[in-house]
Image (cartoon, rainbow, N blue to C red):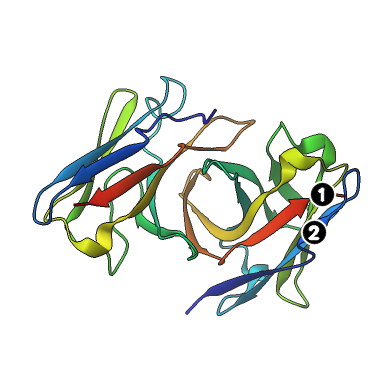
């Protein structure tokens, strides 16, 4: 069982928006703004798409946005495109013992 | 462009040691600008942080693996390595190496880039 909870799957049609949640606890997601998100196409290397909750690395489209409220972080993908179909993982700083926590992953299907 | 590539045996027998090496190109692991880490993905998809290393004297491990784990660094080859001892079938996973950034307070806040991953199977 993963430390951070994500829905197993979400779906949307091209052009629509979807939001993927990532729920932790008051000790991790709720205490730190060190939430990052990764896009993973099977067989390829995972790709960083957001860090520090809402910052996008260079080259990531602004269709990808992030937010946080309490113990839950969210990734929103707007203007869905076929190439967005992938697995998405959230990540957060945990604590001084377990520095890094990951979510179980969410499969995004573009209908 | 920074690239990471995992290498090592893909089949390990139970009770033996899993050993992987990550070769870094496009960046110097001796620069002390990043952590260099290992992450694994179980067959049922979840990711688990294994640990990371900053330099030869500074490394951080997942407590659940600490007793079996050693991460080392070879600056002469621009590589870092993972050794996980006494493996069981539960250690079967895809193992990724990745570079980790940290903020001014030392908190890790991203992993980028990642290697392609190495599927390691523990089986007799």
Location of mark 1 (residue): B123
| Gap in angstroms between the C-alphas marked 2 and 1 | 7 Å
Residue, far right: B15
Where residue A8 sits in the image (x, y, percent)? 37, 35
Where residue A92 sits in the image (x, y, percent)? 45, 38
Q: Earlier in the sequence, mark 2 or mark 1?
A: 2
Left or right of B16 in this view: B75: left
Badge 1: residue crowd in 10 Å (few <14, some 14–19, many ≥20):
few
Residue in the picture at 77% in, 67% down: B8
Residue, far top: A26
Residue in the picture at 61% in, 33% down: A98
Q: Are marks 2 and 1 on the same chain?
A: yes
Residue A51 or residue A63, whichever sits in front:
A63
**Please, is residue B17 above or below residue A10 in the view?**
below
Left or right of A34 in this view: B13: right
Where residue A89 sits in the image (x, y, percent)? 41, 45
Location of mark 2 (residue): B11
The quarter of the picture where residue A83 lies is: bottom left
Report the number of discs: 2
Instruction: Give me the chain letter of mark 2.
Output: B
**Please, is residue A64 above or below residue A66 in the view?**
below
Contact flag, marks 2 and 1 (Cβ < 8 Å): yes
Left or right of A70 in this view: B31: right
Instruction: Give me the chain letter of mark 1.
Output: B
**Please, is residue B39 above or below residue B65 in the view?**
below
Where residue A67 sits in the image (x, y, percent)? 23, 38
Residue in the picture at 41% in, 29% down: A5
**Label 2 residue SS:** strand
Residue in the picture at 54% in, 28% down: A1
Residue, far left: A15
The quarter of the picture where residue A107 lies is: top left
The quarter of the picture where residue A31 lies is: top left
């Amino acid at each position: 069982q993963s430390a951070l909870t994500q829905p197993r799957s979400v779906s949307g049609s091209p052009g629509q928006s979807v939001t993927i949640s990532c729920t932790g606890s008051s000790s991790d997601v709720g205490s730190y703004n060190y939430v990052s998100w990764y896009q993973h196409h099977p067989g390829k290397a995972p790709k960083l798409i957001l860090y520090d909750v809402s910052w996008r690395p260079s080259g990531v489209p602004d269709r990808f946005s992030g937010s946080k409220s309490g113990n839950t972080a969210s990734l929103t993908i707007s203007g869905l495109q076929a190439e967005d179909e992938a697995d998405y993982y959230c990540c957060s700083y945990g604590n001084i013992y377990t520095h890094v926590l990951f979510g179980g992953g969410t499969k995004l299907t573009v209908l | 462009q920074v690239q990471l590539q995992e290498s090592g045996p893909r089949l390990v027998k139970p009770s033996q040691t899993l050993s992987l090496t990550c070769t870094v190109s496009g960046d110097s692991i001796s620069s002390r600008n990043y952590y260099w880490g290992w992450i694994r993905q179980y067959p049922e998809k979840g990711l688990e942080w294994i640990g990371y290393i900053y330099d030869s004297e500074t490394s951080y491990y997942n407590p659940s693996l600490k007793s079996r784990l050693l991460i080392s660094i070879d600056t002469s080859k621009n590589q870092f390595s993972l050794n996980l001892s006494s493996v069981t079938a539960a250690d079967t996973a895809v193992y990724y190496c990745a570079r980790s950034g940290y903020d001014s307070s030392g908190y890790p806040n991203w992993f980028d880039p990642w290697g392609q991953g190495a599927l390691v199977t523990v089986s007799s």
